[in-house]
Image (tube, rainbow, N blue to C red):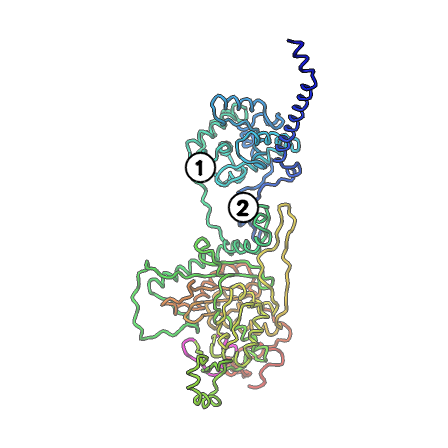
Amino acid sequence: MRKRFKKIITSKPFIFSALAGLFVFIILCAVFMRYIFSGLPPVYEMEEYTPSLTTKVFDRNNNLIHEFSIEKRSMVPLEDIPVDLQNAVVAMEDRDFFTHPGFSVKGIIRAILHDVLTGRAKQGASTLTQQLSRGVFLTQEKKIIRKIREIILAIQIEHQFSKREILQLYLNEIYLGSGAYGVKAAAKKYFDKELSELTTGEAALIVGLIPAPGRYNPFANPTLSRQRRNLVLDVMHQQNYISKEELEKAKQEPLPEKPPVAEAAPGQYFIEHIRRMLEPKYGMDVLWKAGLNIYTTVDIEQQAAAEKIMNQWLQQFDEQVAKGLGIEIDPHDTEAEAEDPNQEETEPKDPQAEYPRLQGAFMVRDVKTGAVRVLVGGRGFDESKFNRATQAKRQPGSSFKPYVWMAALQKGYTPATLVKDLPTMFYYDGRNWRTFDENADLYSLDLAKQSFIASKDFNVWVPQNYGGRNEGWITLRKALEKSKNLVAVNLIDAVGVPAVVRVARKAGITANLPRVPALALGVSVLAMDEHLAALSTFANGGIHTDNYYIERVEDANGRILEQHVPIEEAAFSPQDSYLLVNMMKGVVQRGSGAYVSRLGRNIAGKTGTTQSHRDMWFVGMTPRTAAAAWMGYDDDTSHEKGARFTGSTTARWWTAIMQEVLKDEPNEDFAVPEGISFAYVNPLTGKLAMPTERNKFLEAFITGTEPQSF
């Protein structure tokens, strides 16, 4: 028998078969190992691995104001993680962590025996390194192939990194429930604390979450969470990480009862605006996962104050409208329609009834640089994401008039030039709008009235001042201070619509501007951010700068990806700009924006109220800071009590906000450029004032254009 067996195994057919089988086995093993290793990342990826990080947004004073993240995570060095937390992880998850090569033979055998005896694959045998390799590079599926890859990868990680580096990466990577990745995020999520503030019991609770964050969540399952925390503490005591006294003290610590409630952070419209700017540029993955540092222009304290004050005032207006009480009219408000003395008193209405909700927008920027300090796009970001400061297109009303006045100054007008505040009629002849001249047009219109009236192209427009009042001939200054509509349309007729459009374009307006006389009254639609930047050009001595929101963007390593580079453009002469701003100061001192004078500062401004009071504006500027406020209804309609709202009403809460914004700004006046001289004039005639006149006014002129007669 033995001889026969020996003969068989030494025969050529058997040897060839054995060699063939061995060859096939080697090939199969090679294919299998190739399959195993094909699912592993290369070593250099492990060395360069960076977990998904949180992008941080800072205000102008480097205060953290927002974080963009898919996973709530912050990378922290091991030395900043409490020792109790490190010890608890090692004690519970891998007590042989500092001695094994990446996997534990004892643990694998123990797990296999447990699973065989129970008939379920539930017992874990993964070391911290294996958990890290699984969490970073592999899936969570329970398959033999994945387990083999996990062990191989763990050995590679142990070869490439020190134990401290592995522990640090694990503590920053591990998922701990409620969207928190890493121990720092968990400390904030469950206790609203920094890592350094955690107690032993709190550290134990966080570690207890690792195997099943949902099951041991202290908010959802406090009993299980307490039991798990105490188990962690017991194991720490058994392994001499904490004393008996520390154990008992930690067990007495209360569990968190409810998640920390984050207050509604200010600046959400600003944050959304920069997200819309950066996401297309860098991509969603980079913005949300790459740990960028975004340094912005916003002043978060001023932003918070603006949001609070605007909401308070608009809520007050809503309540007054709902009760049918109306709003008290400022006696200086020339944009308010006259109240009918014969109108019957309205009964107060049910304040709980359904009424439209006033909306508002507010924006502050640096006059010289264009840095945006405050951006309020509405009364509540959670209520409406629509940004009324950057996305809404609303009629500016009389706040457009400074562009008309600048065009007049460029044509040789002075602040003392007498302009016509008299009724004017325009008619459209099918091609252009023309001014009706009684002497030249009356006869021809009478002859052709039948054909004109029958034509669809025939239109007549008769502009009026608010309240229907006019004063004949008044100075250019007084016309702006009193926001005279008739003067505005007569001016645009005199200087030409194209000249006004050119001024608006040079100031920075890019919106479509209709070539009609009514352009002087703000019938175009503008975005607040563009309108504010354009008017700021005049306060900046005629130099235009665009708004900007981001100072610089850095990557996670501090490398600058982009940085704001200021660009200035000389749009108007310093002399014309000063004359216009000096007249706009009169709007605040004596005109429709007189409420703003309560600030006791040198402010140039302009109110704006559109037809039927759909849009109410105030734009004001100091030599350093410009701000715009708007309020109205989102559906572009006017409430029945809308006549009580004007640009002067908006100026009230503009003033309240700017009281806070300007509190640390010195009260400076606009610098007088070379080529400007001053002369006392009669405010009624625009001529030089006699030395004995009591009502004379010190007016600014470009040198050589002063009045020459009394």
Q: Indicate whether 499 appears above or below 272.
A: below
Residue 334, horizontal then vertical, whole percent: 44, 74
Indicate the quadrant where residue 11 lies. Answer: top right
Question: Is 475 colored magenta in this rendering?
Answer: yes
Left or right of 590 on screen, residue 290: right
Q: Count the marks.
A: 2
Real-space Cα separation, disc 2 to disc 1, in angstroms: 25 Å
Identify whether 289 is placed above or below 406: above
Residue at figure coordinates x 42%, y 79% from the top left: 469
- Which residue type does callout 2 highlight? Ser
Which portion, as a residue range, is magenta? 466-481
> SS class of the residue under badge 1?
loop
Q: Nearer the viewer, residue 64 or 685?
A: 64
The residue wearing badge 2 is 69
Q: Earlier in the sequence, mark 2 or mark 1?
A: 2
Residue 463 to residue 561: above or below: below
Which residue: 41% across, 31% down? Answer: 223
Q: Quadrant of residue 466?
A: bottom left
Give me the disc on residue 256.
1
Q: In the image, residue 592 lies at what x, y percent?
A: 46, 71
